Amino acid sequence: MKHKIWLHSYQPTVSITKKVLIIGAGLAGCSAAYAMAKRGWIVDILDKASAPATGASSNQQAILTVKPSNAQPLIQQLWSVGQAYTQQVLHAICGESIGEDWDWPGVLHLHPDDKMTLTAYKQSHDHISNPLKTENESDQDLSTAIYSGGWVNLSRFCNQLLQHQNITFKGSLDIISIDRINQNWQLKTSNQAVFSTTALIIANSYLASQLFANLKWPSQVMRGQISYVPETQQSATWKMILQGRHYLTPAFKHWHSVGATNQLGDYSLLERASDHETNWFHLLSDAPELAQALMLSNQSKPSMMTGWVGLRSVTPDKLPIIGPVVNTDIFCKQYARLQYDANAQFEALPVYLPQCYVTIGHGFRGLTTAPLGGEYIAAALNGETSMLPELLLQSMHPSRFLARCLIRRTLNA
Ligand SMILES: Cc1cc2nc3c(=O)[nH]c(=O)nc-3n(C[C@H](O)[C@H](O)[C@H](O)COP(=O)(O)OP(=O)(O)OC[C@H]3O[C@@H](n4cnc5c(N)ncnc54)[C@H](O)[C@@H]3O)c2cc1C
Protein backbone atom coordinates (compact mmCIF):
# COMPACT_ATOMS: atom_id res chain seq x y z
CA MET A 1 0.00 0.00 0.00
CA LYS A 2 1.14 3.52 -0.81
CA HIS A 3 2.59 5.21 2.24
CA LYS A 4 1.27 8.75 2.48
CA ILE A 5 3.92 10.24 4.69
CA TRP A 6 2.38 13.69 4.20
CA LEU A 7 -0.53 12.54 6.34
CA HIS A 8 1.77 11.29 9.05
CA SER A 9 0.70 11.91 12.63
CA TYR A 10 1.97 15.02 14.23
CA GLN A 11 4.30 14.52 17.18
CA PRO A 12 3.19 17.36 19.39
CA THR A 13 5.33 19.39 21.71
CA VAL A 14 3.52 20.05 24.96
CA SER A 15 2.85 23.68 25.75
CA ILE A 16 4.25 24.97 29.02
CA THR A 17 1.60 27.64 29.38
CA LYS A 18 -1.39 25.29 28.92
CA LYS A 19 -3.45 28.10 27.43
CA VAL A 20 -5.35 27.85 24.18
CA LEU A 21 -7.39 30.20 22.04
CA ILE A 22 -10.25 28.91 19.92
CA ILE A 23 -11.87 30.76 16.99
CA GLY A 24 -15.58 29.91 16.63
CA ALA A 25 -18.05 28.94 19.35
CA GLY A 26 -20.19 26.47 17.44
CA LEU A 27 -20.29 22.77 18.22
CA ALA A 28 -16.74 22.21 16.90
CA GLY A 29 -15.18 25.02 18.97
CA CYS A 30 -17.22 24.30 22.11
CA SER A 31 -16.34 20.59 21.93
CA ALA A 32 -12.64 21.42 21.67
CA ALA A 33 -12.96 23.94 24.53
CA TYR A 34 -14.56 21.30 26.76
CA ALA A 35 -11.91 18.68 25.95
CA MET A 36 -9.07 21.15 26.63
CA ALA A 37 -10.61 22.45 29.87
CA LYS A 38 -11.05 18.86 31.13
CA ARG A 39 -7.27 18.53 30.83
CA GLY A 40 -6.64 21.60 32.97
CA TRP A 41 -5.99 24.05 30.12
CA ILE A 42 -7.20 27.65 30.28
CA VAL A 43 -9.41 28.30 27.27
CA ASP A 44 -10.51 31.54 25.59
CA ILE A 45 -13.14 30.92 22.94
CA LEU A 46 -13.88 33.84 20.58
CA ASP A 47 -16.85 34.33 18.27
CA LYS A 48 -18.04 37.11 16.04
CA ALA A 49 -21.55 36.66 17.38
CA SER A 50 -22.45 37.96 20.83
CA ALA A 51 -23.41 34.46 22.12
CA PRO A 52 -22.19 30.89 21.52
CA ALA A 53 -23.94 28.60 19.02
CA THR A 54 -25.68 31.06 16.74
CA GLY A 55 -24.57 29.51 13.42
CA ALA A 56 -25.26 25.97 12.22
CA SER A 57 -25.12 24.88 15.86
CA SER A 58 -28.38 26.62 16.78
CA ASN A 59 -30.56 23.76 15.54
CA GLN A 60 -32.94 22.88 18.38
CA GLN A 61 -33.26 19.21 17.44
CA ALA A 62 -30.25 17.79 15.59
CA ILE A 63 -30.25 14.03 15.05
CA LEU A 64 -27.53 11.66 16.19
CA THR A 65 -27.71 8.22 14.63
CA VAL A 66 -25.68 5.94 12.42
CA LYS A 67 -27.74 5.46 9.29
CA PRO A 68 -27.44 2.13 7.47
CA SER A 69 -25.48 2.93 4.32
CA ASN A 70 -23.00 1.63 1.80
CA ALA A 71 -20.27 3.89 3.16
CA GLN A 72 -16.73 2.55 3.38
CA PRO A 73 -15.94 0.56 6.55
CA LEU A 74 -13.55 3.32 7.65
CA ILE A 75 -16.28 5.95 7.47
CA GLN A 76 -18.76 3.68 9.24
CA GLN A 77 -16.15 3.20 11.93
CA LEU A 78 -15.75 6.97 12.33
CA TRP A 79 -19.50 7.41 12.65
CA SER A 80 -19.86 4.58 15.19
CA VAL A 81 -16.96 5.80 17.35
CA GLY A 82 -18.19 9.39 17.02
CA GLN A 83 -21.73 8.54 18.05
CA ALA A 84 -20.54 6.55 21.08
CA TYR A 85 -18.25 9.41 22.17
CA THR A 86 -20.93 12.10 21.80
CA GLN A 87 -23.34 9.97 23.84
CA GLN A 88 -20.70 9.71 26.54
CA VAL A 89 -20.28 13.52 26.64
CA LEU A 90 -24.04 14.05 26.62
CA HIS A 91 -24.42 11.78 29.65
CA ALA A 92 -21.53 13.53 31.41
CA ILE A 93 -22.71 17.11 30.96
CA CYS A 94 -26.44 16.95 30.15
CA GLY A 95 -27.32 13.74 32.01
CA GLU A 96 -29.77 15.58 34.25
CA SER A 97 -31.66 17.15 31.39
CA ILE A 98 -32.49 14.09 29.30
CA GLY A 99 -35.92 14.63 27.78
CA GLU A 100 -35.38 18.38 27.77
CA ASP A 101 -32.06 19.23 26.08
CA TRP A 102 -31.72 15.86 24.41
CA ASP A 103 -33.39 12.47 24.25
CA TRP A 104 -32.53 9.00 23.09
CA PRO A 105 -35.80 7.48 21.85
CA GLY A 106 -34.45 5.49 18.88
CA VAL A 107 -34.71 6.19 15.17
CA LEU A 108 -36.98 4.44 12.73
CA HIS A 109 -35.02 4.31 9.47
CA LEU A 110 -37.10 4.02 6.34
CA HIS A 111 -35.71 2.64 3.17
CA PRO A 112 -36.30 5.10 0.34
CA ASP A 113 -38.96 2.98 -1.36
CA ASP A 114 -40.95 1.98 1.70
CA LYS A 115 -44.44 3.30 2.09
CA MET A 116 -44.72 3.85 5.80
CA THR A 117 -48.16 3.98 7.41
CA LEU A 118 -49.18 5.74 10.57
CA THR A 119 -50.25 2.40 12.01
CA ALA A 120 -46.84 0.90 11.42
CA TYR A 121 -45.17 3.90 13.03
CA LYS A 122 -47.37 3.56 16.09
CA GLN A 123 -46.71 -0.18 16.32
CA SER A 124 -42.99 0.47 16.31
CA HIS A 125 -43.45 3.05 19.01
CA ASP A 126 -45.31 0.58 21.20
CA HIS A 127 -42.50 -1.86 20.67
CA ILE A 128 -39.81 0.64 21.69
CA SER A 129 -41.68 1.90 24.72
CA ASN A 130 -42.31 -1.66 25.91
CA PRO A 131 -39.29 -3.85 25.16
CA LEU A 132 -40.93 -6.88 26.79
CA LYS A 133 -43.71 -6.86 24.26
CA THR A 134 -43.55 -9.95 22.07
CA GLU A 135 -43.10 -9.15 18.44
CA ASN A 136 -46.30 -9.76 16.61
CA GLU A 137 -46.80 -10.54 12.99
CA SER A 138 -47.36 -6.98 11.90
CA ASP A 139 -44.15 -5.85 13.62
CA GLN A 140 -42.22 -8.44 11.67
CA ASP A 141 -43.90 -7.24 8.49
CA LEU A 142 -42.47 -3.81 8.89
CA SER A 143 -39.94 -3.21 6.18
CA THR A 144 -38.33 -0.63 8.41
CA ALA A 145 -35.63 -0.77 11.02
CA ILE A 146 -35.20 0.78 14.42
CA TYR A 147 -31.72 1.99 15.31
CA SER A 148 -30.11 3.54 18.32
CA GLY A 149 -30.26 7.32 18.11
CA GLY A 150 -31.65 10.51 19.49
CA TRP A 151 -31.93 14.27 19.16
CA VAL A 152 -29.99 17.06 20.81
CA ASN A 153 -30.71 20.78 21.29
CA LEU A 154 -27.38 21.94 19.87
CA SER A 155 -27.43 25.43 21.30
CA ARG A 156 -28.11 24.12 24.82
CA PHE A 157 -25.43 21.45 24.37
CA CYS A 158 -22.83 24.04 23.29
CA ASN A 159 -23.66 26.28 26.24
CA GLN A 160 -23.32 23.32 28.62
CA LEU A 161 -19.93 22.46 27.12
CA LEU A 162 -18.73 25.99 27.94
CA GLN A 163 -19.79 25.81 31.61
CA HIS A 164 -16.36 24.58 32.74
CA GLN A 165 -14.60 27.08 35.03
CA ASN A 166 -11.47 27.09 32.81
CA ILE A 167 -13.41 28.39 29.80
CA THR A 168 -14.10 32.05 28.99
CA PHE A 169 -16.39 32.93 26.09
CA LYS A 170 -15.65 36.26 24.38
CA GLY A 171 -18.31 37.43 21.93
CA SER A 172 -18.64 40.13 19.27
CA LEU A 173 -15.06 39.51 18.09
CA ASP A 174 -14.80 39.05 14.34
CA ILE A 175 -11.30 37.70 13.68
CA ILE A 176 -9.97 39.13 10.45
CA SER A 177 -6.34 37.95 10.43
CA ILE A 178 -3.99 35.34 11.89
CA ASP A 179 -0.23 36.00 11.87
CA ARG A 180 2.84 34.41 13.35
CA ILE A 181 4.67 37.04 15.42
CA ASN A 182 7.42 36.48 18.01
CA GLN A 183 6.77 32.73 18.40
CA ASN A 184 3.06 33.38 18.98
CA TRP A 185 -0.16 33.38 17.00
CA GLN A 186 -1.49 36.89 16.75
CA LEU A 187 -5.16 37.43 15.98
CA LYS A 188 -6.69 40.75 14.98
CA THR A 189 -10.38 41.58 15.08
CA SER A 190 -12.44 43.96 12.95
CA ASN A 191 -12.66 46.34 15.92
CA GLN A 192 -8.84 46.54 16.29
CA ALA A 193 -8.50 44.18 19.28
CA VAL A 194 -5.40 41.95 19.27
CA PHE A 195 -5.03 38.52 20.88
CA SER A 196 -1.84 36.54 21.26
CA THR A 197 -1.55 32.82 21.96
CA THR A 198 0.90 29.93 21.71
CA ALA A 199 -1.78 27.32 20.94
CA LEU A 200 -4.57 27.95 18.43
CA ILE A 201 -7.65 25.97 17.34
CA ILE A 202 -9.51 27.15 14.23
CA ALA A 203 -13.18 26.16 14.42
CA ASN A 204 -15.03 28.77 12.40
CA SER A 205 -16.59 26.41 9.86
CA TYR A 206 -16.86 27.46 6.20
CA LEU A 207 -15.22 30.85 6.91
CA ALA A 208 -11.94 29.24 8.01
CA SER A 209 -10.31 29.15 4.59
CA GLN A 210 -10.99 32.87 4.03
CA LEU A 211 -9.38 33.65 7.35
CA PHE A 212 -6.39 31.39 6.97
CA ALA A 213 -5.47 30.89 3.33
CA ASN A 214 -2.76 28.45 4.46
CA LEU A 215 -5.41 25.74 4.86
CA LYS A 216 -6.00 25.40 1.10
CA TRP A 217 -9.07 23.24 1.40
CA PRO A 218 -11.99 23.32 -0.99
CA SER A 219 -14.49 25.36 0.96
CA GLN A 220 -18.11 24.66 0.21
CA VAL A 221 -21.32 25.75 1.86
CA MET A 222 -24.45 23.63 1.98
CA ARG A 223 -27.49 25.66 3.02
CA GLY A 224 -30.23 23.78 4.86
CA GLN A 225 -33.74 24.65 6.01
CA ILE A 226 -35.88 22.90 8.60
CA SER A 227 -39.68 23.33 8.83
CA TYR A 228 -41.57 23.47 12.11
CA VAL A 229 -44.94 21.70 12.28
CA PRO A 230 -47.21 22.16 15.31
CA GLU A 231 -47.96 19.02 17.31
CA THR A 232 -51.42 17.50 17.44
CA GLN A 233 -52.97 15.77 20.43
CA GLN A 234 -51.94 12.47 18.88
CA SER A 235 -48.51 13.47 17.61
CA ALA A 236 -47.56 14.85 21.04
CA THR A 237 -47.26 11.23 22.21
CA TRP A 238 -44.83 10.16 19.43
CA LYS A 239 -41.42 9.70 20.90
CA MET A 240 -39.32 8.15 18.17
CA ILE A 241 -37.50 9.92 15.34
CA LEU A 242 -38.52 9.05 11.82
CA GLN A 243 -35.71 9.09 9.28
CA GLY A 244 -36.50 8.71 5.59
CA ARG A 245 -35.20 11.00 2.88
CA HIS A 246 -35.91 13.69 5.46
CA TYR A 247 -36.54 13.36 9.18
CA LEU A 248 -39.42 14.07 11.54
CA THR A 249 -38.62 14.62 15.20
CA PRO A 250 -40.83 14.06 18.21
CA ALA A 251 -42.41 17.35 19.33
CA PHE A 252 -40.13 19.72 21.26
CA LYS A 253 -41.94 22.60 22.98
CA HIS A 254 -45.03 21.59 20.92
CA TRP A 255 -43.31 21.66 17.52
CA HIS A 256 -42.01 18.89 15.29
CA SER A 257 -38.98 19.56 13.09
CA VAL A 258 -39.08 18.29 9.51
CA GLY A 259 -35.97 18.58 7.42
CA ALA A 260 -33.75 19.36 5.93
CA THR A 261 -33.10 20.81 2.49
CA ASN A 262 -29.66 20.97 0.81
CA GLN A 263 -28.43 23.75 -1.46
CA LEU A 264 -24.77 23.75 -2.39
CA GLY A 265 -23.10 27.17 -2.65
CA ASP A 266 -26.13 29.05 -1.32
CA TYR A 267 -25.33 31.49 1.51
CA SER A 268 -28.83 32.87 2.08
CA LEU A 269 -30.13 32.68 5.65
CA LEU A 270 -33.62 33.76 4.61
CA GLU A 271 -36.43 31.23 5.00
CA ARG A 272 -38.12 30.11 1.79
CA ALA A 273 -41.67 28.82 1.26
CA SER A 274 -40.33 26.56 -1.52
CA ASP A 275 -38.06 24.81 1.01
CA HIS A 276 -41.00 24.18 3.33
CA GLU A 277 -42.78 22.65 0.32
CA THR A 278 -39.76 20.39 -0.30
CA ASN A 279 -39.61 19.25 3.32
CA TRP A 280 -43.32 18.59 3.31
CA PHE A 281 -43.16 16.73 0.00
CA HIS A 282 -40.45 14.39 1.34
CA LEU A 283 -42.36 13.67 4.53
CA LEU A 284 -45.46 13.02 2.50
CA SER A 285 -43.69 10.51 0.29
CA ASP A 286 -41.83 8.83 3.20
CA ALA A 287 -44.82 8.59 5.54
CA PRO A 288 -48.02 9.67 3.75
CA GLU A 289 -50.57 8.78 6.42
CA LEU A 290 -48.53 10.35 9.14
CA ALA A 291 -47.96 13.54 7.16
CA GLN A 292 -51.62 13.78 6.25
CA ALA A 293 -52.69 13.27 9.86
CA LEU A 294 -50.42 16.14 10.91
CA MET A 295 -51.60 18.36 8.09
CA LEU A 296 -55.33 17.70 8.58
CA SER A 297 -55.28 18.33 12.32
CA ASN A 298 -53.33 21.53 11.90
CA GLN A 299 -54.99 22.66 8.71
CA SER A 300 -51.54 24.02 7.95
CA LYS A 301 -50.07 24.66 4.54
CA PRO A 302 -46.32 24.50 3.77
CA SER A 303 -46.52 28.10 2.57
CA MET A 304 -47.53 29.18 6.09
CA MET A 305 -44.84 27.23 7.95
CA THR A 306 -42.00 28.72 9.91
CA GLY A 307 -38.58 27.14 10.26
CA TRP A 308 -34.84 27.53 10.71
CA VAL A 309 -31.99 27.99 8.24
CA GLY A 310 -28.31 27.12 8.75
CA LEU A 311 -25.13 26.88 6.68
CA ARG A 312 -23.14 23.66 6.84
CA SER A 313 -19.50 23.48 5.87
CA VAL A 314 -18.98 20.50 3.58
CA THR A 315 -15.95 18.85 1.98
CA PRO A 316 -15.71 17.00 -1.36
CA ASP A 317 -15.13 13.64 0.37
CA LYS A 318 -17.84 14.29 3.00
CA LEU A 319 -15.37 13.81 5.85
CA PRO A 320 -14.50 16.57 8.32
CA ILE A 321 -11.14 18.35 8.41
CA ILE A 322 -9.66 17.70 11.84
CA GLY A 323 -6.03 17.80 12.88
CA PRO A 324 -2.74 19.72 12.78
CA VAL A 325 -2.18 22.42 10.18
CA VAL A 326 0.85 22.01 7.97
CA ASN A 327 3.17 24.75 6.70
CA THR A 328 1.87 24.98 3.13
CA ASP A 329 4.95 26.52 1.54
CA ILE A 330 7.32 23.86 2.88
CA PHE A 331 4.77 21.12 2.10
CA CYS A 332 4.55 22.17 -1.56
CA LYS A 333 8.33 22.15 -1.92
CA GLN A 334 8.84 18.90 -0.01
CA TYR A 335 6.25 16.94 -1.96
CA ALA A 336 6.48 18.79 -5.31
CA ARG A 337 7.28 15.48 -7.05
CA LEU A 338 3.63 14.45 -6.56
CA GLN A 339 2.82 16.74 -9.49
CA TYR A 340 4.61 14.35 -11.85
CA ASP A 341 4.30 11.06 -10.00
CA ALA A 342 1.25 10.47 -7.84
CA ASN A 343 2.92 7.35 -6.41
CA ALA A 344 6.15 9.07 -5.43
CA GLN A 345 7.48 8.02 -2.04
CA PHE A 346 9.16 10.40 0.40
CA GLU A 347 11.18 10.18 3.57
CA ALA A 348 10.75 13.66 4.98
CA LEU A 349 7.95 14.19 7.46
CA PRO A 350 5.71 17.22 6.95
CA VAL A 351 6.47 20.41 8.84
CA TYR A 352 3.57 21.54 10.96
CA LEU A 353 2.72 25.03 12.15
CA PRO A 354 3.45 25.22 15.87
CA GLN A 355 0.46 24.18 17.97
CA CYS A 356 -2.11 25.06 15.35
CA TYR A 357 -5.12 22.79 14.81
CA VAL A 358 -8.31 22.93 12.82
CA THR A 359 -11.75 21.34 13.21
CA ILE A 360 -14.15 22.25 10.39
CA GLY A 361 -16.16 20.62 7.59
CA HIS A 362 -18.53 18.76 9.91
CA GLY A 363 -21.23 18.92 7.24
CA PHE A 364 -24.40 16.99 7.98
CA ARG A 365 -22.99 15.13 10.98
CA GLY A 366 -21.53 17.64 13.38
CA LEU A 367 -22.96 15.79 16.34
CA THR A 368 -21.13 12.64 15.30
CA THR A 369 -17.77 14.18 14.42
CA ALA A 370 -17.28 17.49 16.30
CA PRO A 371 -17.07 16.17 19.91
CA LEU A 372 -14.69 13.39 18.82
CA GLY A 373 -12.63 15.91 16.85
CA GLY A 374 -12.36 18.17 19.89
CA GLU A 375 -11.20 15.25 22.01
CA TYR A 376 -8.58 14.22 19.45
CA ILE A 377 -7.17 17.75 19.17
CA ALA A 378 -7.11 18.25 22.95
CA ALA A 379 -5.26 14.96 23.44
CA ALA A 380 -2.71 15.93 20.78
CA LEU A 381 -2.11 19.43 22.19
CA ASN A 382 -1.73 17.87 25.62
CA GLY A 383 0.94 15.49 24.31
CA GLU A 384 -1.19 12.33 24.60
CA THR A 385 -1.26 9.52 22.08
CA SER A 386 -4.55 9.41 20.19
CA MET A 387 -6.94 6.58 20.92
CA LEU A 388 -8.11 6.71 17.29
CA PRO A 389 -6.58 4.45 14.64
CA GLU A 390 -4.00 6.12 12.37
CA LEU A 391 -6.04 5.40 9.21
CA LEU A 392 -9.04 7.18 10.68
CA LEU A 393 -6.93 10.21 11.57
CA GLN A 394 -5.49 10.27 8.06
CA SER A 395 -8.97 10.19 6.51
CA MET A 396 -9.76 13.48 8.31
CA HIS A 397 -6.28 14.99 7.96
CA PRO A 398 -6.20 18.70 6.91
CA SER A 399 -3.37 18.05 4.39
CA ARG A 400 -5.27 15.53 2.28
CA PHE A 401 -6.65 18.23 -0.03
CA LEU A 402 -3.29 19.93 -0.34
CA ALA A 403 -1.71 16.68 -1.55
CA ARG A 404 -4.62 16.20 -3.95
CA CYS A 405 -4.06 19.70 -5.35
CA LEU A 406 -0.40 18.85 -5.98
CA ILE A 407 -1.27 15.56 -7.69
CA ARG A 408 -3.88 17.26 -9.87
CA ARG A 409 -1.57 20.21 -10.50
CA THR A 410 -4.18 22.69 -9.38
CA LEU A 411 -1.73 24.42 -7.07
CA ASN A 412 1.50 26.25 -7.84
CA ALA A 413 4.26 24.55 -5.90
C1 LIG B 1 -30.42 22.54 8.34
C2 LIG B 1 -29.36 21.78 9.07
C3 LIG B 1 -29.67 20.59 9.69
C4 LIG B 1 -28.69 19.87 10.36
N1 LIG B 1 -29.02 18.69 10.99
C5 LIG B 1 -28.08 17.99 11.65
C6 LIG B 1 -28.40 16.79 12.33
O1 LIG B 1 -29.56 16.38 12.36
N2 LIG B 1 -27.38 16.11 12.95
C7 LIG B 1 -26.08 16.57 12.94
O2 LIG B 1 -25.21 15.91 13.53
N3 LIG B 1 -25.75 17.69 12.31
C8 LIG B 1 -26.71 18.41 11.67
N4 LIG B 1 -26.37 19.57 11.02
C9 LIG B 1 -24.95 19.93 10.98
C10 LIG B 1 -24.48 20.59 12.26
O3 LIG B 1 -25.40 21.60 12.64
C11 LIG B 1 -23.09 21.17 11.99
O4 LIG B 1 -22.22 20.15 11.52
C12 LIG B 1 -22.44 21.78 13.22
O5 LIG B 1 -23.33 22.65 13.87
C13 LIG B 1 -21.18 22.52 12.80
O6 LIG B 1 -20.61 23.16 13.89
P1 LIG B 1 -19.41 24.18 13.67
O7 LIG B 1 -18.98 24.59 15.01
O8 LIG B 1 -18.42 23.59 12.75
O9 LIG B 1 -20.07 25.41 12.87
P2 LIG B 1 -20.97 26.62 13.41
O10 LIG B 1 -21.97 26.17 14.39
O11 LIG B 1 -21.48 27.34 12.21
O12 LIG B 1 -19.93 27.53 14.22
C14 LIG B 1 -18.96 28.34 13.60
C15 LIG B 1 -18.83 29.58 14.47
O13 LIG B 1 -17.72 30.34 14.00
C16 LIG B 1 -18.06 31.70 14.14
N5 LIG B 1 -17.19 32.48 13.25
C17 LIG B 1 -17.10 32.38 11.90
N6 LIG B 1 -16.14 33.20 11.45
C18 LIG B 1 -15.62 33.84 12.50
C19 LIG B 1 -14.59 34.82 12.66
N7 LIG B 1 -13.90 35.30 11.60
N8 LIG B 1 -14.31 35.26 13.90
C20 LIG B 1 -14.98 34.78 14.98
N9 LIG B 1 -15.97 33.86 14.89
C21 LIG B 1 -16.26 33.38 13.67
C22 LIG B 1 -19.52 31.77 13.78
O14 LIG B 1 -20.14 32.94 14.32
C23 LIG B 1 -20.05 30.49 14.41
O15 LIG B 1 -20.53 30.68 15.72
C24 LIG B 1 -27.35 20.34 10.39
C25 LIG B 1 -27.03 21.56 9.78
C26 LIG B 1 -28.03 22.29 9.14
C27 LIG B 1 -27.68 23.61 8.52
Image (cartoon, grey):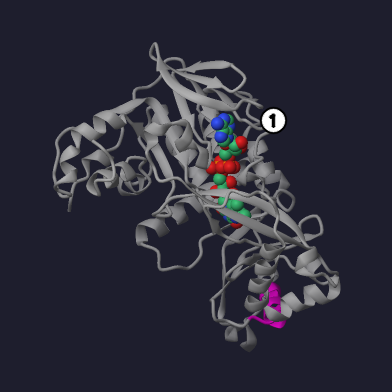
Answer left or right for 190 relative to 359: right
- Residue 407 to residue 129: above or below: above
- Which residue of the protein is positioned furthest toward the bottom in this rendering? 137
Residue in the image at 19% along x and 44% along y: 339
Answer left or right for 259 relative to 232: left
Q: Quadrant of ligand 1?
A: top right
What secondary structure is found at the residue carrying circle 1?
A: loop
Residue in the image at 62% along x and 30% along y: 48
Counting from the top left corner in percent of width and height, residue 97 is at: 72, 46
Counting from the top left corner in percent of width and height, residue 341 is at: 14, 48
Residue in the image at 65% along x and 56% along y: 151
119 falls in the magenta region: yes
Q: Which residue is mark 1?
A: 50
Q: Mark 1: few, some, or many residues within 10 Å (few <14, many ≥20)?
A: few
Q: Nearer the viewer, residue 386 or 413?
A: 413
**Which quadrant of the structure image shows residue 294?**
bottom right
Tell me which segment is drawn in magenta: 116-126
- Residue 304 to residue 328: above or below: below
Can I make out residue 349 in this image?
no
For the stretch drawn in magenta, what is the main secondary structure? helix
261 falls in the magenta region: no
Counting from the top left corner in percent of width and height, residue 224 is at: 61, 56
Label 1 sits on what residue type? Answer: Ser
Can I make out residue 51 in this image?
yes
Q: Nearer the viewer, residue 122 or 312?
A: 312
